[in-house]
Image (tube, helix red, strand yellow):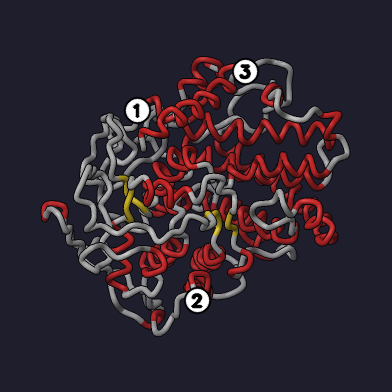
Amino acid sequence: MNTKYSKNIASVLLGGSMLLGAVGCTDKFEDFNTNPMAPTPEEMEGDYASTATLISNMIPTVAQGQENNFQMLDQMIGYEFGHMTAAKNMWGGDRYYATYNVGNNWSGNMFDTTMPQIYTPFFMIRNISGGEGLTYYWADLLRVFGSLRVSDCYGPIPFSKIGSGSDFTVAYDDMPTLFNAMFEELDLVIAGLKEAAVNTSSTQALFGNADYIYKGDISKWVKFANTLKLRMALRLVNVEPQLAQKKAEEAVNDLGGLISNASDAAWSTYIPGGNALHKTNILWDEGRVSADITSYMNGYSDPRLPFYANKAVDDTYTGLRSGIFHASNVAPYSTPKVEAQSSLLSISASETWFCRAEGALRGWNMGGTAKELYEQGVAVSMEERGAAIGNYLSSTATPANYVDPTNSIYSINAVSTVTPKWNDNGSFEENLERIMVQKWLGNYPNGWETWADFRRTGYPKFFPAVNNLSTDGVSSARGMRRLPYPLSEFNTNEANVKAAQAMLGGPDNSATDLWWALKN
């Protein structure tokens, strides 16, 4: 964390904490909309341009474009635990995500930042729209997306009961209730957005400048919603397999379609200070490409690697293992290939194909065989990155051993033997691993979905953190399972957050599995 920006980060986090501190996680979330700089409801009533501004304010729930929020959420949590990048700086403390001993002052960041990002504009839009119409359904979609990500970090969260009563506190949903409620909202969203999508030219004119993802093309937001539904369905394969199959098949068969080609992929141009990955990893020199990425991709001679990483000083692609901090001598490690004006990835087109491939492997109706869908996913990923696929799909290469360029004690043999080539005679587990590896590579550098996949399937296989400093019992093999609930909730919503702790099935710490993460 560049010390030049430390005060900015503190103020951003304090702002989120103060918003939550004023009302807790409450049925009075509407109090978030008392920002004196915001337009009044009277000024916005009937004004689609103003509600579009509120939609734009929710886009960070999809991709954190502001560099401080990006660093504290995406880089330190999603990218680190998804083994896309690895932090190299200690920032003057001794408790970090990368070493599995994150402090209480950081573990609440995801909650304290994202919940206000969701509910400040959401309630304003709901009040203006009366809970119907294009902007309401759009905002509700972003609410579901952001809530899933918050839940992926903590488990049970407030959702279905927010804004439903008059008390100043609100109960958390246990996770089965949460997923049912999110699916219910998402189904309403998909139906509502499909109605609005018939007037795409009008919505592009109204919302184009405010929509950092699809420039007001609502038909693509329908695909985004169906893809989110498919993503959510796969969370449940180990705990609610029948519901998972039902929702996945609904998403695949919906006439609104899925994100399926490069032009549909969700990339955010909300980068107010320039691309945040570029700023944190290049300008601030705070991270490097993960050693896991370079191990797999070097072994595969993967044609996407030059599009993902820069060569190190010795003309090799060499990543950094997680859980090592280097104050100096990092020239031998590869930086991410990213420019100051690059967009930020939320959902790749290839992810859809790999989700469908996993479903087909499980016997679901996904519109093709697991092999067909897997190979299409790889092809689409190559197309998305501008790489030539060549004979990649017939390759029997395996991940490479990792050789650390600065200290041999950090070198490690490859932890997987899975190949790019599909194995018709392979076991379920072998081909599931194959799908998860390519889904991970296709989503680079966004690691959020990989962290979820790893916790529910055990794949991809990753190098253990070099320094596991957990005091909660986090194992090096299984990694961080969740984050403890934020202190802000104990200060403002104590009874309900304590009730949520009882829903976890274990201690409120980083070693307790989420409800759906039962396999790995």
Q: Can you say whether 467 is above or below 193 in the image?
A: above
Mark linked to residue 386: none
Q: Can you say whether 4 is above or below 500 in the image?
A: below
Q: Image check: 325 left or right of 22?
A: left
Helix, strand or loop at disc 1? loop
Q: Identify the mark nearer the N-term, 2 or 1.
A: 1
Q: Position of residue 33 (x, y in %)?
A: 71, 26
Q: Can you say whether 432 is above or below 165 in the image?
A: below
Count of labels in the image: 3
Q: Quadrant of residue 90?
A: top left
Task: Inspect this view and state whether residue 515 appears.
Answer: no
Number of other residues with Cα within 10 Å of mark 2, as a class: few under 14, some 14 to 19, many 20 or more:
some
Spatial CA span between label 2 and label 3: 49 Å
Spatial CA span between label 2 and label 1: 41 Å
Q: Amino acid at mark 3?
A: Val
**Residue at image location 60% in from the left, 57% down from the top:** 230
The residue where tag 2 is placed is 379
Q: Amino acid at mark 2?
A: Ala
Q: Image check: 46 left or right of 193?
A: right
The residue where tag 1 is placed is 103
Q: Identify the mark nearer the N-term, 1 or 3.
A: 3
Q: Amino acid at mark 1?
A: Gly
Q: Which residue is outermost to the right? A: 46
Q: Identify the mark nearer the N-term, 2 or 3.
A: 3
**Residue at image location 83% in from the left, 34% down from the top:** 44
